[in-house]
Image: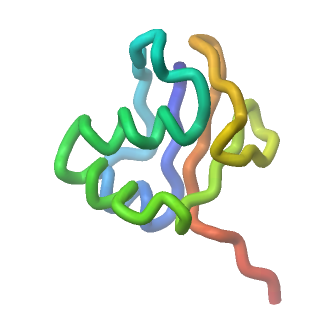
Amino acid sequence: MKVLYFAWVRQKVGMAEEAVSPPDEVRNVAELITWLAARSPGHAAAFAQPKQIRAAVNQEFAGPDALVAANDEIAFFPPVTGG
């Protein structure tokens, strides 16, 4: 699974992307966030308030219940503001 980080999420995690292999119990975006938060202090800081994080699965906006799979690309970013 390829995970991409954008804006302040990237700054807190300390990298723009990484390849991860979460356990089989990680089936959706919310579970992936929980699993990622345990990987390092930077991940924990980035995902400390998961409601402030938006996600996309294979370049489609996705909610916390969206399913994830081994070959997916998951992106995490702050809420997008218009203007």
Residue situated furthest bottom in the rendering: 83
Q: Position of residue 68 (x, y in %)?
A: 64, 24
Please tell me which residue lies in front, 22 or 71.
22
**Vertical arrangement, residue 16 with respect to residue 7, above or below:** above
Q: Residue at (41%, 30%) from the top-left corner?
A: 18
Q: Is residue 8 left or right of residue 62?
A: left
Q: Residue at (78%, 48%) from the top-left corner?
A: 61
Q: Position of residue 4 (x, y in %)?
A: 53, 40
**Vertical arrangement, residue 78 with respect to residue 30, above or below:** below
Q: How many marks?
A: 0
**Vertical arrangement, residue 6 with respect to residue 62, above or below:** below
Report which quarter residue 27 is drawn in. Answer: top right
Q: Residue at (55%, 60%) from the top-left corner?
A: 53
Please tell me which residue lies in front, 38 or 75.
38
For the rendered model, the colour scheme is rainbow
Residue situated furthest left in the rendering: 41
Report which quarter residue 40 is drawn in. Answer: top left
Q: Residue at (77%, 39%) from the top-left corner?
A: 59
**Vertical arrangement, residue 6 with respect to residue 29, above or below:** below
Q: Is residue 54 left or right of residue 15?
A: right
Q: Position of residue 71 (x, y in %)?
A: 63, 13
Q: Position of residue 73 (x, y in %)?
A: 63, 28
Q: Quadrant of the C terminus?
A: bottom right
